[in-house]
Image (cartoon, rainbow, N blue to C red):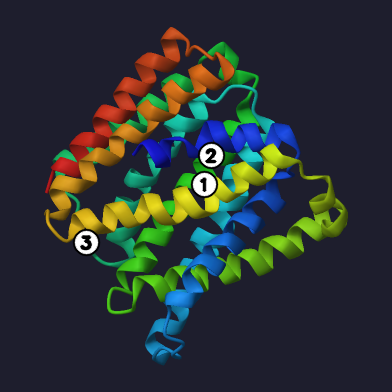
Amino acid sequence: MFFLGSAYPLGKFGLDSSVNPILFGALRMGIVFLCLVPFCKIKIPSKKYFLPLVGFSISMGVAVNFFLYVSLYVSNILAPITIGAQLSIPFAIILSSFFLNESISLKKWILIITSFLGIVLIAFDPKVLDEVLGFILICGMAFFYGLSQVFSRYLKELDVKFTNAFMGLVGFVILFSLSNIFEGNVINQINKIDLNGWLTVLYAGAIISIFGHLMMFYLYKFYPVGKVLPFYSLFPVFGLILTFFIFGEIPTIITVCGGIIVITSVYLLHKTR
């Protein structure tokens, strides 16, 4: 959770250093692909996996990175962005009910509504009102992250390394093209990236995307999903702590209260069957 929470302050640090947001996402996905492809068996999956695999790759590899880094780029404060990312869990549950016909109990609906009310409370923070674009973008990121989890349910039989390597390749190609269109010549952009920028990109690709998630998959071998998932509620806590040490940012009382509501609701959602 420390690694996952560090994605927000260190991503902002890299963007402020020398990396454009869409290119940051493209390079991150390129690193994921390069790190995983040597361990993959190249095998064309069955046709029934094609659409879910493409959907997962576009949702997770393209949309999540696009909305995340553009959100960080346009935002001056990170606390609402870090907390808003928690909406991915309620979104995932709602989308699962539509696409997978999974039932949602009354208790879960109450917790989902409560989590959104916490976000609404944060939105009334005067500081957040000046950062409304970044706040909306991170909600978009949370939606696509939740959607990617739904697609991943259709891919359970495929090798995790293969699905993530394919996702990295698709994310790199599409985001690289978008960066070239909207941010200018990518060769010129890459030449301008300094050491701090490259270090944050490498950290995001190799440590957060691969090492952090592999640690979670390792835990799933020994513990039930219900015992592991609630710890996802901790990543905003580590993110906010790192934000304080890197940028000296202290959340407002409204953001803290809204954050407590959101994080508690998401934690209880993980614990509720």
Residue 11's mark?
A: none
> Gap in Å between the C-alphas at discs 1 and 2?
5 Å
Residue shown at 37% from the left, 25% from the top: 118
Residue shown at 35% from the left, 15% from the top: 257
Q: Tag 3: Cα neighbours inside 10 Å, few (<14), some, or many (≥20)?
A: few
Residue 154 position, x and y percent, is 32, 74
Residue 92 placement, left or right of 264 = right
> In the image, what residue type sits under mark 2?
Ile
71 to 255, vertically: above or below:
below
> In the image, what residue type sits under mark 3?
Glu
231 to 186, vertically: above or below:
above
Residue 102's mark?
A: 3
User: Decide: marks 1, 2 in contact (CB < 8 A)?
Assistant: yes
Residue 228 position, x and y percent, is 19, 47
266 to 155, vertically: above or below:
above
Residue shown at 40% from the left, 53% from the top: 211
Q: Tag 1: Cα neighbours inside 10 Å, few (<14), some, or many (≥20)?
A: many
Q: Secondary structure at mark 3?
A: loop
Give the number of the mark in front: 3 or 1. 1
Residue tagged 1: 141
> In the image, what residue type sits under mark 1?
Met
Foreground of the two, 122 or 106: 122
Considering only order in the chain, which callout, 1 or 3, is on the residue closer to the N terminus?
3
Q: Tag 2: Cα neighbours inside 10 Å, few (<14), some, or many (≥20)?
A: many
**In terms of image quadrants, where is residue 134?**
top right
Residue farthest front in this picture: 195
Q: Quadrant of the N terminus?
A: top left
Residue 119 appears anywhere in the view: yes
